[in-house]
Image (cartoon, helix red, strand yellow):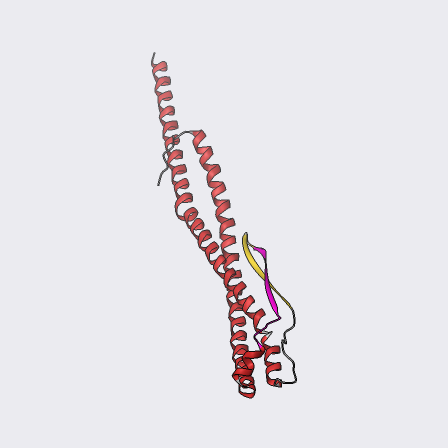
Amino acid sequence: MILAVNPNRMELLKLKRRLELANRGYKLLKDKRDALIQKFIKLVYENKRVREEFDRKIRERTNEFLLATICMGENDLNSIFMFPQRLTKVKTEYSNIMSVKVPKYQITEKGNLFTYGMIDTSPELDNSLKKYQEIAPLMIKMAELDKAIVLLTEEIEKTRRRVNALEYVMIPNLEDTIKFITMKLDEMARSSNSAIMRIKEMIRGE
């Protein structure tokens, strides 16, 4: 589509500068989109690995805890967890991935894991609780990766739209307008030369 501009040399120079900037921006955005996609793919594979590890460990820990429940009895098990002494906090920081602020979660735990005397409890319970400590960091990591993937997906889509707008709208429109103005200026130059030639012939005829 030809833009609505006056076909003169000043506009032609402006449009050529705009086209140069548009081509440069197109290349930068295209490189950014490709880099984002590569990072996105890496995060998806990492997320898959962490989820598989989490699923495996949660099954193992659940089975161990069920065994502890059978050994001690549900009532005794409930009574020893009535007064928890373990405090878990999650701190959020941010890192930058291609201008995208991605959260990084850090887990901190304070207090005693065991809130009971070990004489009246089974070894299965102790082992189960110790191994359950491996679950929380994996849950935090999954949440971190899920959020990063969502944010990168949104940024990839925004960057893709900008790349397409430059590639299929702005740059073609600028190129068409530059060709149009160049043709108009050439026509004006030829008309002007023809008029000058006619005037010269008229002068010679006199």
Residue 93 lies left or right of residue 172; in this view the side is right
- How far from the left and from the top, in percent, is residue 65? 55, 82
In this rendering, position of residue 138 left or right of residue 154? right
Residue 169 screen position, x and y as percent: 39, 45
Q: Which stretch did the figure color magenta? A: 81-96
Please report the residue visible at 52 percent of the width from the left and 65 percent of the height from the top: 143
Q: Quadrant of the C terminus?
A: top left
Task: Look at 34% across and 14% down and name the residue there.
Answer: 205
> Quadrant of the rendered structure where residue 136 is?
bottom right
Q: Is residue 89 magenta?
A: yes
Provide residue 190's location: percent of width, then percent of height. 37, 28
Q: Quadrant of the N terminus?
A: top left
Residue sitting at the far top = 206
Query: Which of the 4 image quarters holds residue 178?
Result: top left
Whether residue 188 is situated above or below residue 99 in the rendered picture: above
Q: Is residue 38 above or below residue 55?
A: above
Question: Is residue 11 shown to the viewer in this render?
Answer: yes
Q: Is residue 61 visible?
A: no
